[in-house]
Amino acid sequence: MQYDIGLAAQSISLTRGCRLAADGRTLDGFDRVPASAVLESARLHFHTPTKTKASLASDGSVLVQTRGGQRWRVSSDCGSLSVQPSIQLAHTAGRQETVCVCITFDPAKTPTVAWRWERQA
């Protein structure tokens, strides 16, 4: 899958691939920045449903818990993970606060970033 991101001076086509395990417990994926892109840094954003809680774990992964009680561990092979505040505008009740999981990386050194969402017991 490819998607375009427009920047002030350029447009970049990123490539994303993902694979959901047959049991639905693991989503493995990657995002690739083309070699022609000139970027000092980049950040992937994974926006979560409303009322989701997330925190940075001691191993550098992010632990995500949905309001329904599901727990997920988000990890990446490179870059640094963080949790940022976000909002959902398309909610029927109006603007809703939530969080997003971010992976910050240097595309010049690592143009392909692998990531994983793994459901916890």
Image (spheres, grey):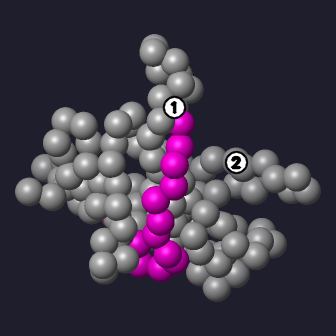
Q: Main secondary structure of the magenta part?
A: strand
Q: Secondary structure at mark 2?
A: strand
Relative side of 120 to 53, left or right: left
User: Of the numbered discs in the image, which one, if any, rests on residue 101?
Assistant: none
Residue at x 26% of width, y 42% of height: 66
Relative side of 85 to 50, left or right: right
Residue at x 20% of width, y 52% of height: 71
The answer to whether residue 70 is magenta is no
The answer to whether residue 83 is magenta is yes
Label 2 neighbour load within 10 Å: few <14, some 14-19, many 20+: few
Q: Residue furthest left?
A: 121
User: Of the numbered discs in the image, which one, if any, rests on residue 4?
Assistant: 2
Position of residue 74 measured from the top left corner of the image (x, y, whole percent): 33, 63
Residue to which mark 1 is pinned: 88
Is residue 36 visible in the rendered image? The answer is no
Is residue 15 visible in the rendered image? The answer is yes
Which one is in front, 50 or 77? 50
Q: Secondary structure at mark 1?
A: strand
Q: Nearer the viewer, mark 1 or mark 2?
A: 1
Relative side of 92 to 14, left or right: left
Position of residue 19 measured from the top left corner of the image (x, y, whole percent): 33, 55
Give the magenta range. 74-87
| Identity, as a three-letter code, of the amino acid under mark 1 | Gln
- N-term-proximal mark, 1 vs 2: 2
Whether 17 is drawn above or below 96: the answer is below
Residue at x 52% of width, y 18% of height: 94
The image quarter in which residue 93 lies: top left
| Identity, as a three-letter code, of the amino acid under mark 2 | Asp
Position of residue 118 measured from the top left corner of the image (x, y, whole percent): 24, 60
Label 1 neighbour load within 10 Å: few <14, some 14-19, many 20+: some
C-alpha span from label 1 to label 2:
21 Å
